[in-house]
Amino acid sequence: MRLPMWVSQHLAALRALLVLTVLTGIVYPLVITGVAQLPGLKHHADGSLIKVGDKTVASALVGHLFTDSDGNPLVQYFQTRPSAAGAGYDPTATAASNLGPESVVDTLPDPSKPGDAGKPSLLTQVCARSIAVGKLEGVDGRRPYCTPDGMGAVLAVFHRDGLTGPVTRVVSLNQACPARPFVSTYQGVPVECAKFGEDYSRGVVTPIRGDAPAAPAVPADAVTASGSGLDPQISPAYARLQAARVAKARGVDVSAVLKLVDAHTTGRALGFMGEPAVNVVELNVDLDRTYPIHG
């Protein structure tokens, strides 16, 4: 007995579904899992886990915050770069800040809301982080276009004819009143502090470079987050900046710490892609193993 055409078509589709389900849902995953367990691949396939004794303490692929319960850096450890993933290096909230180079004007705190901190621009975040890292490492934390206290040095400059003509008014956009502006005058016009809720959109946004060194002592990766928010690497320059502090906290010679830094520094991929980097997680685990802190 010949089956109706529509039944034959449905049976053929069902057979194809079953065959593809077995191949792609069972056979293929099992083969790939088996290949991934081969020597040389197993460690990476299992998540590049780091063990201390029999205890898994971290993954070499995901950064960690080496801070105390209040968020202060632990001086005996190398610090990672900032992270925009959740509260920091949260694998379930991997993300970037989505702030770009034009993010230079802060959202001022609302004085009617106690505890409101506003929303800092990317420039202010970089400035504040640079000052903090400078204090921690004992170097000059100043950067171009930053105020001495770590805010974006940005003015709204009002001209008589809109974008041209004499300057009639100047406001320091990121310094909420009653703050004292980082410069007192601009082209002979007194600089005002900013007031929450006022519209300064008619002013020309003008970053002021200031007298910070052209090459900041604090490297760029120390003040900016990675795209994923999870990267465990920092630049060799940032690692070397921290070496003296870590060596002092652990009571060892800085040259010994620098040797560990070199041991955990990887070069460019294939010799030309990317930049050299230091895996902070692996470095800190090695520090605890080699130069443990007692007491």
Image (cartoon, helix red, strand yellow):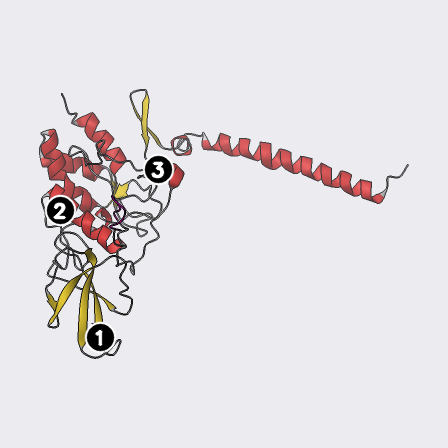
Label 2, label 3: how many angstroms apart (C-alpha)?
Answer: 26 Å
Q: Quadrant of residue 47?
A: top left
Q: Residue at x 68, y 35 (%)?
A: 18
Mark 1, residue position: 159
Task: Decide if residue 113 is on the left or right side of residue 149.
Answer: right
Whether pointer 1 and pointer 3 mark residues with C-beta atoms closer than 8 Å, the reply is no
| For residue 67, above or below residue 292 | below
Query: What is the number of callouts on the image?
Result: 3
Q: Main secondary structure of the magenta part?
A: loop
Which percent across, then down, holds residue 168?
18, 74
Name the front one of labels 1 and 3.
1
Q: Nearer the viewer, residue 41 or 214?
A: 214
Label 3 packing within 10 angstroms: few (<14), some (14-19), many (20+): some
| Amino acid under disc 3 | Asp
Mark 2, residue position: 134
Q: Nearer the viewer, residue 221 or 47?
A: 221
Whether pointer 2 and pointer 3 mark residues with C-beta atoms closer than 8 Å, the reply is no
Residue 133 magenta: no
Magenta extent: 110-117
The label shown at residue 90 is: 3
Look at the numbered disc 2 and give the secondary structure of its residue.
Answer: helix
